[in-house]
Amino acid sequence: MPKEGRIAVSGAMRGLRWRVAWALVALAVVGMWWYASGGAGYILQVDYSWTGDMLEGADVIIDGEVAGVLERRSGQYVTGFRVDAGEHQVSVRTGECAGRPEAVTMDGRNRRVVFMADLREGVQNGAFRCTVVLRR
């Protein structure tokens, strides 16, 4: 093969190597983004920015068990919990306020569900009562 032909093939191979390298980098970036965003799992989030610090540390109950507590991350009043596919009962309670359960179905259409937590307060039978209400 003449020298000019070898140089052309060598240049073409170098260009192909760069394209393959960029494709691998792009694939790695997409993979990291997918993993960081929760992957293929289901995420249930409770946004308690309406109540602020009043619900900080409140228990989140999913299907009758405490799944964790509400805590700020990066200054945001949102806490997320991984759940399995299917129907779940969710409520939030503090020492002073009972939680009203809400049902949610996690499926292919609902991979990430956000509840807004709010407090309903009042006097009932002469005693102060409050309830944590979840809204979608």
Image (cartoon, rainbow, N blue to C red):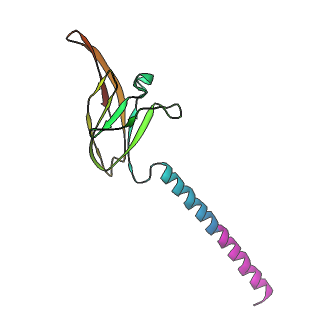
What kind of secondary structure does the magenta stretch mostly adopt? helix
Coordinates of residue 135 in the picture (x, y in percent): 32, 31
Residue at the location (41% across, 24% down)?
Answer: 50
Residues shaded magenta: 1-18
Residue 18 to residue 37: above or below = below
Coordinates of residue 23 in the picture (x, y in percent): 59, 64
Residue 128 to residue 52: above or below = above
**Residue 66 drawn in magenta:** no
Residue at the location (77% across, 80% down)?
Answer: 7
Residue at the location (52% across, 52% down)?
Answer: 33
In the image shown, does 96 or 134 lie closer to the viewer? Answer: 96
Q: Is residue 18 left or right of residue 72?
A: right
Q: Give the quadrant of residue 119.
A: top left
Q: Give the quadrant of residue 11.
A: bottom right
Coordinates of residue 42 in the picture (x, y in percent): 37, 48
In the image shown, does 70 or 2 lie closer to the viewer? Answer: 70
Q: Which residue is most to the bottom?
A: 1
Q: Which residue is most to the right?
A: 3
Residue 94 to residue 79: above or below = above
Residue 15 to residue 75: above or below = below
